[in-house]
Image: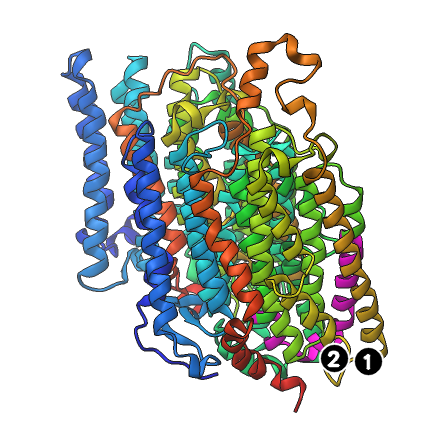
Amino acid sequence: MIASLLAAAGDWVAPTLDYHALAPEIILAAGIFAVLSIDLFLEPEQRWITSALSGFVMLGALVTVGTLAVIGDDTRSMFGGRYVSDEYALILKALFLVAGYIVVLMSSDEIERGRYHQGEYYVLLLTSVLGMVMMASSRDLLSIFVALELLSIPAYMLAAWNKRNSRGNEAGVKYYLLGVFASAITLYGMSLLYGVTGTTLLTDLGSAITANGRFSGVEVIAVAFIVVGFAFKISAVPFHQWAPDVYEGAPTPITAFLSVASKAAGFVALVTLTFVAFPNAEDVYQPFMWVLAALSMTIGNLYALRQTNIVRMLAYSSVSQGGFILMPLTVAGVDGVGESALKAVVVYLVVYAATNLGAFAVVIAVARKTRSGEISSYGGLFGYAPALGVLMTIFLASLAGIPPLGGWFAKFGAFKAVLDADTGWGYSIAIIAAINTVISAAYYITVMREIWMKDEPTGDTTPIRTPPSLGAALVITCGATIVLGVLPDIVGRFGDITDLTGALGR
Amino acid sequence: MDVISDQNWVLSVGTFLPLAGVLVMLLIPKREELLHKQIALITALATLAVGIYTLVQFDYGQAQSLQFYASTEWITVINSGYTIGLDGISLPLYFLSMVITVLVMIYSWDHIPSPGNPKAFLILMLVLQTGMAGTFIAQDLILFFVFFEVVLLPMYFMIGVWGGEQRQYASLKFFLYTMFGSALMLVAFLALFYQTGRESFSIPFLVENGINIDEDVALWIFAGMFIGFAVKVPMFPFHTWLPDAHTQAPTQGSVILAAILLKLGTYGFVRIAIPILPQAAVKWAPVIGVLAVIGIIYGALGCLAQSDMKRLIAFSSVAHMGFVMLGISTLTATGINAALFGMVAHGLITGMLFFCAGSIKERYHTLEIKRLSGMLIQMPKLGWILGFCAMASLGLPGLAGFWGEFPAILSAYNPAPQLDVTLFRTLMVIAALGTVLAAAYLLWLYQRTAFGEPNPEFTGHGHAHAVGAAGNDEHHSDIHDVNIYEWVAWTPLLIAIVVFGVYPQLMFKVMDPAVTQLVGVFNP
């Protein structure tokens, strides 16, 4: 046994590492150690340095993503195609890093006020972002799983950050238990798939599944299990129950992080798997995705209508938006539709990230004054804090899909993809989505009505002081929301099918 | 369709200039109210100047071609371009939107509705202006859709924040109706895109290729656009948002709504639905015609039942837009010319009526017809202006309203050859009855409010509430005749009503070449 292992080890050659391609990950890893060790030597009142440093680490990694995009080969493949830095990976890495940076901006004031474990907070945040960045490049079941755990485990801890608050504890425990359960299901699915096909490399899986022309029962179960595991991560109905409680209990910047970055990471994994590993399994995943998408948008909307707490409302809204992002995947396997389906998902993720992060930034700013998450506490906001009122209006209108704000193009792309398919599945999901677009407008407009047309419930109309870092987050997200809506071509050129190496068996 | 691309910057400047004013105003604190009014007015005037320049530079000899045409890539992934142009159909409406915005700005100088905040109010108005002008120049369906929607939120807030008692209900109704309509419209646009080979959303392109779409499919696509536009017009039975929105909106909002926003719907029919899908338009025309005539009669009867002056004017809009839609449904040059004229005339006249209603409300704090009387004694000038507008609105020959209604009715006598003559002649008779009803409700309104002795409640030496003497004096002192801002804001409209009434050719000759080209397909 040992002899045979040793014999095999003899053939082992060190893989060639493309350090440029790995630069974002290396910078993040180095940043994690730097923040962790510097934190040891800081006085409590100097702890803000960890926040600033984390921000710089994200930006530094972002710079290398930029250089990767312009210098040299677009596609850099390592470890026999198990870890690939192609354009698809780069745009998503950029998305995660910018989202991470905005979360740092949103956090700095919130966490400083809490005055404990600032350094650890940022270390966990950076680690989670590292997991996401890895997820974008992972093209192997194992590396996808490692990335998934790397991004999830810090998130479990961050969700429970308000440890003296029972809701915070509830959030952490719930998220952890359900998350681990979902990971286990994913892993079980992966092991089945490996058992049947004998490979973990996604491109090999792509050709191995239905190699003999038909599905084996095990393959169906394996694909279904893997999708379920990620459905939890993207809080698709019926795997969404954790989301509202966790979102409400976690610190608001972390809620924003979970609802945008962590969700996007789940989608990235799903998209990579769908296009690279399951191109022949469309008969299994398409109906599955259809059910998830239809349920997510409908149930998410119906619950969102009933919420009185803004964070819970945004939680259900993000469940519903998740349904829209899933929508193109319900037809991804139809001939010729893969292109617009992939583009629709990538565009939606980018636009949704900008908009939703912005909405949460306003929630943080307003909560500084009102100390409340109730929607009714937004009454009269436009009167005493017009800037925040207008910003929230812009973000909500974008989520509702009203032009000329980013959300309209995202929704448009999703509709276009399913109509492109010209199948009964596509048309039926489009009708469901169209009805849901109008329903969702109702709850977004409830908040706008509070902001513009109601009076401040307590009569306290002192202006809100927005800390500069939070202001910067608002400016970035608002600018992105408007620009992406007016000039959608900026993001419309991302997410080409050729960007994703090995997609659809190419 | 021919295009002329000289001076292709003109339309973009005219459309987006208001946003420059918005940017400046955003940087100035809210308390500088006077400064905000000045900047807003200057921006609107500058926009109007660009509009006048457009009017001067427009080549009237080629009014059927798209002029100042510009086209660049915008969203390449869906082959949608930033394609803009202006022809004889859109020019009057484009210019009207600029004029109305300026006049409304002037009116706002001392009429900022409660709860104040001119900064926000004027910014919303400038954004509205961009949306309106943009809709009239867009020659790409996606661009059209975006501008069409840009109008939605500012109007929602204008009604919801600065409106009357029931403002929240009215604004929500407005929002959801329009949102529902535009969702269907967008689906129809997408369907057009697919049915014509996924090549372009450009309107000239689709006009050339839309005719090849299968008739069954075309009927459905037309249905989608029909509902989207009909909600905006509004046509019976999609009109129920209008009386609420109009009644609750602040004066400025009502004026813009009546003068421009309703026209976005009718314009959509003339610019998009009919030229792109003539084969479906022929099939749908009887439906449109019947609904239009129901609207005429229903609106008139609704007017007779109203006790609130503003609500009455709102219902009269339903009736007037019925005439416009009747003209469009005949698919003839006469009918569509009349409809386009009617849009502008209705904008001028009903806009003016809403101005009057706003000023009356400001003075009497009520618009209940029962309580108003003797306006000619208390405020002779305002009383006469109201009378003038009522006459114009009922279609008195010599004033602008006549040239919208009369040819529309006339055109129904001889609809396009593909249409059922008997049906349209029946519609013609019923519509003619509608004009009688219009005379009835407008004259009755005028008689009740302007004639007779002033209501003692408002004369100061009255009865019951003399107890609250101080309050009463204040109340009474509100009642004054037309002031200078009102004169400045209203005179251009009053002059235009007369000028277009006396010399309608001024507008007909601009529109006719484009309209003739448009209906050419129905009269081979």
Q: Name the foreground residue: B244 vs A499.
A: B244
Residue B341 as seen in the image, left or right of residue B450: left
Q: Is A27 left or right of B445, judged from the image as shown? A: left
Q: Residue at x 44, y 59 (%)?
A: B133
CA–CA distance between discs 2 and 1? 7 Å
Instruction: Specify the principal SS of the magenta part.
Output: helix
* In this rendering, position of residue A27 left or right of residue A231: left
Residue pointed to by mark 1: B421
Marks 2 & 1, CB-CB < 8 Å contact: yes
Quadrant location of residue A422? Answer: bottom right
The image position of residue B155, as x and y in percent, is: 52, 44
Percent position of residue B415, x then y? 74, 79
Residue range corresponding to the magenta coloring: B271-299
In the picture of the structure, the residue carrying the numbered disc 2 is: B415
Q: Identify the residue shown where x is 70% and y is 69%.
A: B406
Q: Is residue A499 visible?
A: no
Q: Relative to B374, is A421 above or below?
A: below
SS class, disc 2: loop
Label 1: chain letter: B
